[in-house]
Amino acid sequence: MTTPPDPAGETFTERQQAVLDTVLALMVEQGGDVTMTAVARRASCSKESLYKWFGDRDGLLTATVRWQASKVRAGNYDRQKLDILALRDSLIRFAANWLGVISSPTSVALNRFAISQAGTRGSNLGAIMLANGRFAIGERLKPLLDAGREAGLLDFNDTETAFRTFIGLVGRDVQIRVLLGDRLSLAPAEIERDAARATDQFLTLCGTEKTGPGRNPTNA
Amino acid sequence: MTTPPDPAGETFTERQQAVLDTVLALMVEQGGDVTMTAVARRASCSKESLYKWFGDRDGLLTATVRWQASKVRAGNYDRQKLDILALRDSLIRFAANWLGVISSPTSVALNRFAISQAGTRGSNLGAIMLANGRFAIGERLKPLLDAGREAGLLDFNDTETAFRTFIGLVGRDVQIRVLLGDRLSLAPAEIERDAARATDQFLTLCGTEKTGPGRNPTNA
DNA sequence: ACGGAACCGTAACGTACGGTACGGATGTTT
DNA sequence: AAACATCCGTACCGTACGTTACGGTTCCGT
């Protein structure tokens, strides 16, 4: 079996995964109103099978969130022999990757759904999204930040605080704007520029004297 | 002819405003499932009146968002005779006020609802929230930033970019976390501390040589 | 080949909720 | 006082959707 270990004990067959991908597609293109009938028709399966496999509607949607979360895991960014150029490059690639993720239609649709369910009692979708989004990237980036500090390239007291400063500079108001439907053009070139700007700002704040660029590196 | 739903200059009677406050209360304490029957019962009014006053459910909810937005408007932050202390103080108070707003239960509930509706076609609640939230505070803060630049205290090219840097440093990941249901303790003392930290970081990035604090003011 | 399990497509059921209609009570105008 | 407007409370209607049930088909094991 090539499937990676399943933390929640939930594993799905190929057919069921295809159904979950269908749910994702419906969420993206049609907004939150994903009906069981629409899923069954689009996935060419019977509603009876949906209920047998996922219990009820909430189970189907929860499984969809978990399924998407399981697909997002990417490689770490820590590395050996870290110099300032490698650190800056890693930070920029990390920022660009994250900007691309949070502005992607799938992420937007999924976050919208999780947020809309976060207010109701007995919903842990928000916690799942946080664990696989915000906190997962934190755990992936922090080793890089710590390595930068070990190498004398960064200067900060609390890794968590430094991380939050970095994602604040990278994300700014992007996430809330796309969630609220703002047509925010984030072409790859712009993402790359924003990632570099945020990284240089971060290095101005947390870099050591010999590593960081000058004050106000991009006049922003 | 009485007052039909007035899209442009919307003004409501005391009774209608009480109804809208009821909707806000229901949104806060019960999540997104605000039914017309629940509103009518809680507000002690008939559904017929709801439909007469607000047209339909979407009109009621849109009016609620506008009503809340009309209550948030606060004083401007521009002032004469600007020195570095006054500028820093204004920025800190602005940041603290905004952090308090975005972490308040009412704002969270309203944003959740607008976001859940942002995916469906024919919904402008997200645009309303953006206009009265993100863009409104931008128009209120930019004069202060421009004044700071005029006074030689700040150095940036684009006011919009500088503003986005500032709110990125202030908000960081707070908004997405509270929207997803993260129990984020934001006591007034912590808000004040975060506002000061973000402001000093911003002054490090955008302050002129003689005004800004040293590099890495808070080791974050 | 035969029996059974899994599954698809569709129909049917029950409920929730948006929207409408109506009787009765209260306040306002003439 | 009489006519009228406003509004509350409740009952009602139509629809959408979650959920269940069932007949027909395919596939697998023996």
Image (cartoon, coloured by chain):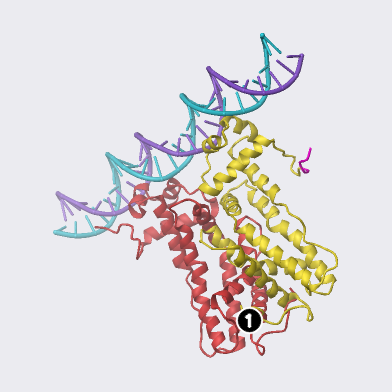
Chain colours: A yellow, B red, C cyan, D purple
Dividing the picture into quarters, in which one does residue C8 lie?
A: top right
Identify whether D18 is placed above or below B6. above
Give above or below for C12 relative to B216: above
> Quadrant location of residue B5?
bottom left
The answer to whether residue B79 is magenta is no
Residue sitting at 52 percent across and 78 percent down? B142
Which range is magenta?
Answer: A1-5
Predominant SS of the magenta segment: loop
Task: Name the foreground residue: A64 vs B141.
Answer: A64
Q: What residue do we see at 65% from left, 75% from top?
A: B198
- Residue B50 is left or right of residue A158, and the answer is left
Residue under the point 76% across and 76% down:
A207
Is residue B103 in sight in this rendering?
A: no
Asked whether the viewer can see residue A69, the reply is yes
The quadrant of the picture occupied by the N terminus of chain B is bottom left
The C terminus of chain B - image quarter:
bottom right
Quadrant in the picture for residue A89:
bottom right
Which residue lies under the disc numbered 1?
Answer: B206
Q: Amino acid at mark 1?
A: Cys
Residue A141 picture location, percent across and down: 75, 62
Q: How many marks?
A: 1
Q: Answer with left or right where residue D18 lies relative to residue A100.
A: left
Q: Nearer the viewer, residue C13 or B25?
A: C13
Q: Residues within 10 Å of mark 1 (few under 14, many from 20)?
A: many
* Circle 1: element type: helix
Whole-percent x, y for residue B135 in the image: 50, 69
